[in-house]
Amino acid sequence: MMKNNKRTLITALLAASFAFAMPLSAFAQKKIVLGFSQIGAESEWRTANTNSMKTAAAAAGIDLKFSDAQQKQENQIKALRSFIAQKVDVIALTPVVESGWDTVLKEIKDAKIPLILVDRSVDSKDTSLYATHIGFDFVEEGRMAGRWLVEKAKSMKGDINVVELQGTVGSAPAIDRKKGFEEAIKAEPRIKIIRSQTGDFTRAKGKEVMEAFLKAEGKKINVLYAHNDDMGIGAIQAIEEAGLKPAKDILVISVDGVKGAFEAMIAGKLNVSVECSPLLGPLVMSTAKDIVAGKSVPKDIQGKDGVYPMETAAKEFPNRKY
């Protein structure tokens, strides 16, 4: 009887130890959960960026918790706090504006959840609040646009009056693309920005604001500089409706390099687009895996950008993935 009792006890202990070991084994194999707060779907670029994140997460075996903020910071802050409550492994944030994040970012840090800033940055002085920023040098994109115009100005006479369609007020690309453009055009004193207003990165608002510019300034306008392609495409519609020829009567410069911009360039309606590739998903997912694995990652990781004038658009168009 004693031997049988001992056997029963040993069997029970082995079963118990196996039961306790199971969750540890399962934990080792569990998927990384990544919470992603996206700005919204204000443009062709943003839609491509969202698709890239979703596709890359699926390919990497990462469980993506996706939240669309509909261009509102308060919605993003709610989503970030929801991710903290869900105890996700990593948080990715594309901030709609630069300021006003410190409180919630400290909450994320206190919860020991690594944060990846995607595309846009924040103006927090405490860089320990995020693990890395994966995005672009928006100032340099503005400089690229400005340098193209300075070169183009060599074949133009007289003053060159520019109207500017800015992105969302307070957003990193709006602030930086303006700054870089203004830096570059200092090389040509004839180039002057005569009007500048936000178009919220949307096609409809770009058209509306360009209509107002045309009513106010008319044929004084020589150049349109739009902080993204969607606003530029909306403005092209306004230029045409005013009886003018875009890319001829008014030069059109925009940023992003989406398919719609290439189609406009091929049609002879847009002069140049500065590329800012939205396909950041694979880079974000590989970085998230490295962070979870305890590997060190650079504080700033740059995506792809470049300049595409209309003369190269037809040749490049087949290579466009967004």
Image (spheres, rainbow, N blue to C red):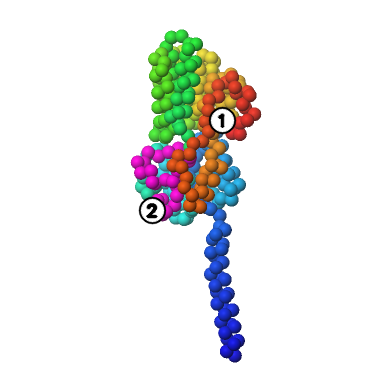
Mark 2 — residue? 110
Ranked by sequence position, the earlier of labels 1 and 2 is 2
Q: Tag count in the figure?
A: 2
Number of residues whose C-alpha sits closer than 10 Å to that of mark 2, classed few (under 14), some (14–19) or many (20 or more):
few
Q: Position of residue 97 (x, y in %)?
A: 41, 37
User: Which segment did they paint magenta?
Assistant: 107-134
Mark 1 or 2: in front is: 2
- For the point 50% across and 25% down, the residue is 254
Q: Position of residue 311 (x, y in %)?
A: 59, 19
The reply to whether residue 205 is visible in this rendering is no
- For the point 54% across and 61% down, the residue is 27
Q: Position of residue 164 (x, y in %)?
A: 44, 23
Using residue 274 as the reference point, say whether residue 178 is left or right of it: left
**In which quadrant of the rendered image does the C terminus lie?**
top right
Q: Is residue 238 magenta?
A: no
The reply to whether residue 86 is visible in this rendering is yes
Tell me the SS state at disc 1: loop
Q: Nearer the viewer, residue 122 or 199?
A: 122
Q: Residue furthest bottom?
A: 1
Q: Is residue 109 magenta?
A: yes
Q: Which amino acid, by three-letter code, is at mark 1?
A: Val
Q: Which amino acid, by three-letter code, is at mark 2?
A: Asp
| Alpha-carbon span between mark 1 and mark 2 | 39 Å
Using residue 312 as the reference point, say whether residue 182 is left or right of it: left
Tell me the SS state at disc 2: helix
Mark 1 — residue? 258
- For the point 61% across and 31% down, the residue is 320
Number of residues whose C-alpha sits closer than 10 Å to that of mark 1, classed few (under 14), some (14–19) or many (20 or more):
many
Q: Residue furthest right?
A: 318
